[in-house]
Amino acid sequence: MNSKQLFVVIFALLLIGLSQINGAKEAVRGAWVAVQEHLVSLGRNSYQHISSYFNATQKVRQLQKENLQLKKEINELEAVVSSLSQLPYFHRVSKPYLEFTEVISYANIPYFTRVFIDYRGAVNRPKGLVYNNFTAGIVTKSLGSGALALLNSDPQCSYAVYIGKNYVPGVFKGGEMRVKYIPLFKKVNVGDEVITSGIDGVFYRGAKVGKVVKVERKKLYQEALIQPYLDGTNPTYFYVVEKVPPEDLKPYQPPQDVNGTDQNGTETNTTKKLDNLKTQKEETKNHKRR
C-alpha cells in the first residue's frame, strides 16, 4: 500500500471517529437536558407541595384561632343564658333607696363567699345586699368600676337584726350563721324569724334573714343558730341598699293595744297617768262627801 492509499484510509477512519464522538456528545447532551427537565419538574412539584403544606398549616392555625374565639363566645353566651334563667325568679323593686346590680365574678376562687358586682356608687360604710327581700350579704368596698360584696357565708359579714315577734335585738355573724349578743333576759325560741333591724344603717328594717334552729345561753348573752332563707352560692342579680329610711334607724317601738300595754305586756306611762288621775278624782270626791 502506497502512502496515498494509507492517507485515504486514515482520513476515513478519522471521519468515522469524529462522527461517533459527535453522536456521543449529542446523546450526552440529550440525557443532560432530560435530567435538567426532570429536576426542574421535581423542584416545581416540591415547591407546590411545600406551599400547599404551609398554606394548610396556616389554615389550621387560623381555624384553631377561630375555634378558640367561638369557644369563648359560647362560654360568654352560656353565662348570659344562666343569668337570664334566674330573671323569672328575681323581683324588680322600685324604691328610691335600692339600686339594681349584677354580679361580675367571684372574688376569691375557689372560695365562693365574696363577689365583684357592677355597683359604682360610693361605699363609705357597709351597705346591705338583698335578693327578693332576703338578705344576701353586705357591700364593703368600692373598686372604681365595681364593688366588693361579702355574702352571708363570709365570716366578716355582719349586721344588726331582730328576732321573733318581740323584736329581740342581736347581731348576725356570717360564716357561722349565728345571731350573737342576744340579751339573756330576752326570750328567744326555735322557729323565731330573724329580720334586719335597720338601726346600724346597713339594711332597711324587715329584710328576711332566716329562722332560729337552736338557742345557746352563754355567760353574758345568748346565741342563736340560724337557717338562712337565701342560698347565695349562685348569685346573679341583687339590690344594694343605698340609704336606710330614717324611721328604720330608730329602735323598734312595739305598738300599743287598747289596754295600754305593748306586745310584750308592759304597761305604758299613759295608762299609769290615767290610773293616777282616776285615783285622784276618787279621792277628791270622797273628800267632798266628808
Image: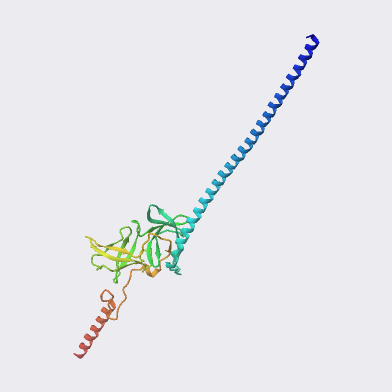
Picture quadrant of residue 233: bottom left
Classify 149 as above or below 280.
Answer: above
Residue 101 is situated, as x and y percent measured from the top left of the image, at 45, 62
The image quarter containing residue 159 is bottom left
Front position in the image: 187 or 22: 22
Is 278 situated above or below 164?
below
Instruction: Answer left or right for 281 relative to 19.
Output: left
Quarter of the image containing the C terminus?
A: bottom left
- Name the residue at 62% across, 38% down: 45
Q: In the image, 271: left or right of 22? A: left
Looking at this view, name the residue that lies furthest to the right. 4
Which of 104 and 267 lies nearest the eye of the viewer?
A: 104
Query: What is the x, y in percent for residue 12?
Result: 77, 17
How many marks the image carries: the answer is 0
Let me know if residue 80 appears in the view: yes
Work out whether residue 41 or residue 141 is closer to the camera in this orientation and state it: 41
1 or 15: nearer the viewer = 1
Q: How is the image coloured?
A: rainbow
Which residue is the extreme one toward the front? 1
At horizontal 59% and vertical 40% (from top left) the residue drawn is 49
Q: Residue furthest top?
A: 2
Classify 60 as above or below 92.
above
**Residue 194 quadrant:** bottom left
* Residue at horizontal 52 percent and vertical 51 percent from the top: 67
For the N terminus, the quadrant is top right
Q: Image point 40% across, 64% down: which residue? A: 130
Q: Which residue lies furthest to the left in this view?
A: 290
Residue 218 lies left or right of residue 35; in this view the side is: left
User: Residue 35 at what x, y percent from top left?
Assistant: 65, 31
Residue 242 screen position, x and y as percent: 43, 64
Q: Is residue 201 visible?
A: no
